[in-house]
Amino acid sequence: MCVNRASQRGVSLTGLIFWGIIIAMVAAAGVKVAPDVIEYYKIRKAIAAIAQDGKLGSVVEVQNAFDRFADIDMIKSINGKDLTVVREGNGYVVSVAYERRIKMIGPVSVVLDFEASTGK
């Protein structure tokens, strides 16, 4: 009597738990990092809009314009004084660099270095 057994396919319970833990850790890290990354893109958008504004006459006006953007977009990481503003032709090159440290679990933290500039 010959029995033809089909091979079993799938994931074992141990494998399922292992990959579930890995996916949960990555998701938790993403949830903690996402707000800072979203804020970085708001900052990039704000400095791009400011650099294209031809009406701003001084560095202080550029910094105040950023502070107004920051109030509207709820940007808390930096303010207008943190910007590096250089006059170039009729406009300005606006740049910023800052660091965020996000506490994860126990002594583990993630450091994010953000840099943005309107220059080429």
Image (spheres, rainbow, N blue to C red):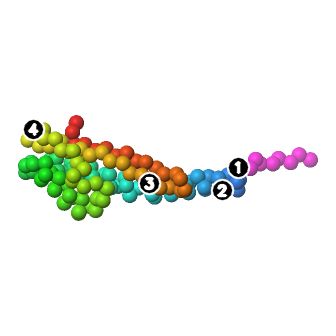
Query: Mark 1 or mark 2, which is nearer the start of the sequence?
Result: 1
Q: Which quadrant would residue 39 be assigned to in this image?
A: bottom left
110 left or right of 98?
right
Disc number for residue 9: 1
Q: Which of marks 2 and 3 is in front?
A: 3
Against 68, is 1 above or below? above
* Residue 3 highlighted magenta (yes or no): yes
Judge whether residue 27 can be spotted in this image: no
Identify the residue shown where x is 20% and y is 58%.
Answer: 67
Magenta stretch, residue numbers: 1-9
Judge whether residue 110 can be spotted in this image: yes
Q: Which quadrant would residue 78 be assigned to in this image?
A: bottom left
Query: Mark 3 or mark 2, which is nearer the start of the sequence?
Result: 2
Query: Mark 2 or mark 4, which is nearer the start of the sequence?
Result: 2
Q: Dot 2 lies on which element?
A: helix
* Residue 2 highlighted magenta (yes or no): yes
Query: Mark 4 or mark 3, which is nearer the start of the sequence?
Result: 4
What residue is disc 4 on? 89
Residue 58 image position (x, y, % from top left): 9, 48
21 left or right of 120?
right
Identify the residue shown where x is 77% and y is 48%.
Answer: 6
Q: Is the C-beta separation of discs 2 and 3 under 8 Å?
A: no
Q: Estimate the spatial distance between the alpha carbons at disc 2 and disc 1, rounded to whole Å.
A: 17 Å
What residue is disc 2 on? 17
Amino acid at circle 4? Gly
Residue 73 image position (x, y, % from top left): 26, 61
Q: Which one is in front, 22 or 58?
A: 58
Q: Is the C-beta separation of discs 3 and 1 under 8 Å?
A: no
Identify the residue shown where x is 21% and y is 53%.
Answer: 80
Residue 30 image position (x, y, % from top left): 46, 54
How crowded is the residue under tag 2: few (<14 C-alpha within 10 Å), some, or many (20+)?
Answer: few
Disc number for residue 99: none
